[in-house]
Image (cartoon, grey):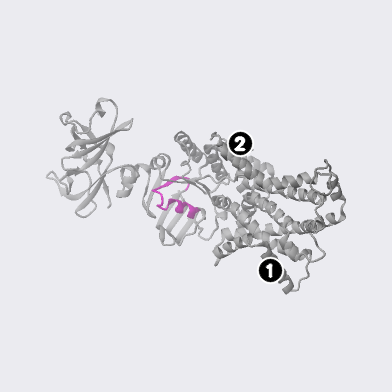
Amino acid sequence: MNRRSPPALTIAAILVFCFIYAPLMVLVAYSLNTAEYGVGWGGFTLEWYRRIFEDRDIQRSLGVSLLVSIPTVLVSTALGTVNAFALYRFQFRGKDFYKFMLYIPLVMPSVVIGISQLLLFVFIKKELGILTIIFAHISFTVPLTTLVILGRMQRIDRTLEDAAMDLGADEITTVRRVTLPLLKPGIYAAALLAFPWSFNDFVITYFVAGVGASTLPIRVYSMIRLGVSPMVNALGTLIVLIPLLLVVAGILLERRKI
Amino acid sequence: MSATVEFRHVTKRFGDILALQDISLCLENGEFFSVIGPSGCGKTTLLKLIGGLLTPDAGEILIDGKVVNDIPSYRRSSNIVFQNYALFPHLNVFENVAFGLRLQMTGATASELRHKADKALGVVRLEDFGDRMPGQLSGGQQQRVAVARALVLRPKVIMLDEPLAALDRKLRKEMQAELRRIHQEVGITFVYVTHDHEVAMSMSDRLAVMDHGIIEQVGDPDTIYHRPQTRFVAEFMGASNIFEGEIAEQTDGARALRTASGLTIDVDIDPSSGKTMCLSLRPELIDVYTPDLGIPHQNQYQGEIVSRIFLGNAVEYVVRLETDDIILSRVPSRQLRQSAYKPGDRVTAGWNRDCCNELKH
């Protein structure tokens, strides 16, 4: 247990860590740089962060993003819970196929999802806007929430439900008083993982957003078309850090033992 | 006494497997009843059928005189103490015990609930543990919470599924005594499922021995132990010597059994029927001594010690008789000298004619 890892392994681990996080470090560093153009270091400043908080366009697109992500998370977590119940509790025809199909959106290229979503909305003549973004986001986060909640559900001891019924709880009371409380960490984890998926998504959103509704990632994209300003760096830093904290919280919750 | 639980020709299948075959059984009010048998014999199925976690494929189950086949588990006056206790990990001990109470006594005040739950926790001697979470309790304490959780509802019958299996030996002894005490205190019918015949014998008023979905025998521990009716029961209740052979009449009118190997055993039994008979003989009823000791047993055979196992309070000898029959004898180890036979020693094995028990088949 207390064996020290060999030095080579330690070095490899550090290199991997750098490989993953060095670009982010650079981003964070530049977001604190006074030099507006070029790559030189001009000195420390929080000016860019201040400007973000004053920029009306950024505020508006943050609003759009939240308006998309919050309903997305709520709906897809609810659907994921119901889905997981169906998959775990009941036998139905095509169950294995259905379960398999859940994995496909997780590995499908975003571009394909984006195009197909767009085609669908055009086909049914739905005007693009916040609503179409939400629909698209729900459709690609539901597989995630379902699988996370299903994973948790499979770890719940079935005899606990037998015990609840034996003690006088009918099916609904058992779900309400025993199953759902035990599932709660899984549901929270699913929500916390779904949020950044929705909040960060650029590709799919880009296809289904239309003109009026730009989410934060789309705003960032249109900003860098005019050149990379340190303000984008600062915004990038915020966009990375906030969901990162949520994901860490999600993982910690999921790990918590029953 | 009236019956709390009754099985009338109950059959239960799982796919092609017949888990219970035409079981009929009556549990008396307030008795401590054990169901024993090897794993897979159907004992847990029996228990789940009483609790309503399973429904029978044929036959009727009655609780308190009413057919409960179609009554769901949550409306039955029966509670199970699960093998793994199944305490709700997200609720503390008090809430675990109060779980069923809240559903049973809708509209009860908080203090009524508190009073009842505390009383049940008192019976299992865990008064001060109400605020603990199940994860903070030892195995024995968790098990007592599970018992309290069932007791507090005052069901007609409480079922315990191998409740002591997960506990260490010392704790198991304590919990055994504890369960006996609780049973006497509350006077509810207990159904105790286990594969351990010693535990079952020491605790039960009556017990049923099961094998392959069939009840082999029902009776009080004494009868089951000394008068097993089938070979399976005789062997399941601890090792036994089994003899099979033809019935022979001795010159003095007494009965005897003559085995194919040529052994003639005097017995004190009126054979039930036919020409053949099957006997069981407990190892502790067979004495082993040196030939010159001359203890007057009605059945005496010369033989040779094959092996010896020292058990502490007894010594087990495997003896090969001159007819090549192998018998097992268990002799109390009172003195060193008596347990001093070694493999290869010539000995006499002897028992009285009233020691043998007739098996039905």
What residue is disc 2 on?
A: B129
Question: For this rendering, which residue is in front, B192 or B288?
Answer: B288
Q: Verify whether residue B38 appears in magenta.
A: yes
Which label sits in the foreground, 1 or 2? 1
Q: Can residue B62 be seen in this view?
A: yes
Q: Which amino acid does label 1 sit on?
A: Ser
Q: In which quarter of the image is residue A110?
A: bottom right
Q: In which quarter of the image is residue A77?
A: bottom right
Question: For this rendering, which residue is in front, A241 or B190?
Answer: A241
Q: Mark 2 lies on which chain?
A: B
Instruction: Give how far apart the Cα atoms at labels 1 and 2 are.
Output: 59 Å
Q: What residue type is labelled 2?
A: Phe
Q: In this view, does B141 lie above or below A245?
A: above
Q: Is A227 positioned to the left or the right of B16 in the image?
A: right
Element type at mark 2: helix
Which residue appears at 39% of the width and 55% of the height? B213
Q: Is B248 positioned to the left or the right of B356 in the image?
A: left
Question: For this rendering, which residue is in front, B15 or B236?
Answer: B15
What residue is disc 1 on?
A: A116
Q: Verify whether residue B74 appears in magenta.
A: no
Highlighted range, magenta: B29-50
Element type at mark 1: helix
Count residues near mark 2 (Cα–Cα under 10 Å), then give few for <14, some for 14-19, many for 20+. Answer: some
Q: Is A25 positioned to the left or the right of B235 in the image?
A: right
Q: Mark 1 lies on which chain?
A: A
